[in-house]
Amino acid sequence: MLNHQQIEINEIFTPEQLLENRGRVAIFIDGSNLFYAALQLGIEIDYTKLLCRLTGGSRLLRSFFYTGVDRTNEKQQGFLLWMRRNGYRVISKDLVQLPDGSKKANLDVEIAVDMMALVGSYDTAILVSGDGDLAYAVDAVSYRGVRVEVVSLRSMTSDSLINVSDRYVDLENIKEDIQKTSKSAGYTYRPLSAIGLMEEHD
């Protein structure tokens, strides 16, 4: 069911007015979720542009980037070092091999704990994820006075997450602002589970 209060607020206030009322923002990015959304959109993310677009001129407390890692993968280590030196606080967890041979690291708990632990230090949370498992954490921080914006690709975003957010932004609508161009510098993010697939096309 749609949140009618959310619709009414979005009709009353312009995007500029909404941004003015953000206060201090904290950004929480599910790296793997963002990568697969970008894959669906057919773009590569420019992480400098992404940080600027998400912050939107508001005061930034910190931008967290959550990802699974393979300590032996030099390309990924280089990317994470670049991220640390360009405005991101990287939170990583070693990948676990699943019975089917794939590798995965679930960082939902880390995202939820950090969102809760920092309540009082920020006014608006920007969550870059479509994972419905985070809906309870989003609801919890909103009851403690935090405004929550969810940014993700609509086809990969749980309705339960959208329903507890104060504002939802579809990545499809901002892809021009965050995609890497031929002149863009920086690293490409590739989760370990997708490296083999991507290298076949390089």
Image (cartoon, grey):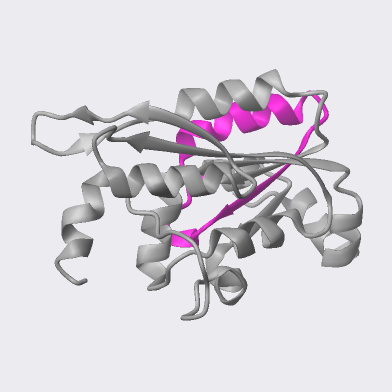
Residue 195 appearing in the image: yes
Q: Residue furthest left?
A: 100
Give the residue at x 59% y 72%.
173
What is the quadrant of the C terminus in the image? bottom left
Question: Is 16 colored magenta in this rendering?
Answer: no
User: Left of 153 or right of it: where is 116?
Assistant: right
The span shown in magenta is 130-159
User: Left of 128 or right of it: where is 76?
Assistant: left
Question: Taking 47 as reference, is 101 above or below it?
Answer: above
Disc tally is 0
Give the residue at x 65% y 46%.
87
Give the residue at x 47% y 43%.
81
Give the residue at x 33% y 53%.
190
Q: Position of residue 167 (x, y in %)?
A: 71, 52
Q: Position of residue 24 (x, y in %)?
A: 84, 40
* Quarter holding residue 54: bottom right
Residue 14 appearing in the image: no
Q: Position of residue 108 (x, y in %)?
A: 46, 29
- Residue situated in front as seen by the camera: 147 or 76: 76
User: Left of 72 or right of it: where is 98?
Assistant: left
Question: Taking 184 as reference, is 2 above or below it?
Answer: above
- Residue situated in front as seen by the camera: 44 or 149: 44
Question: Taking 67 as reference, is 82 above or below it?
Answer: below
- Residue situated in front as seen by the camera: 37 or 90: 90
Q: Position of residue 98 (x, y in %)?
A: 15, 30
User: Left of 163 or right of it: where is 42?
Assistant: left
Question: Is 148 colored magenta in this rendering?
Answer: yes
- Residue situated in front as seen by the camera: 184 or 67: 184
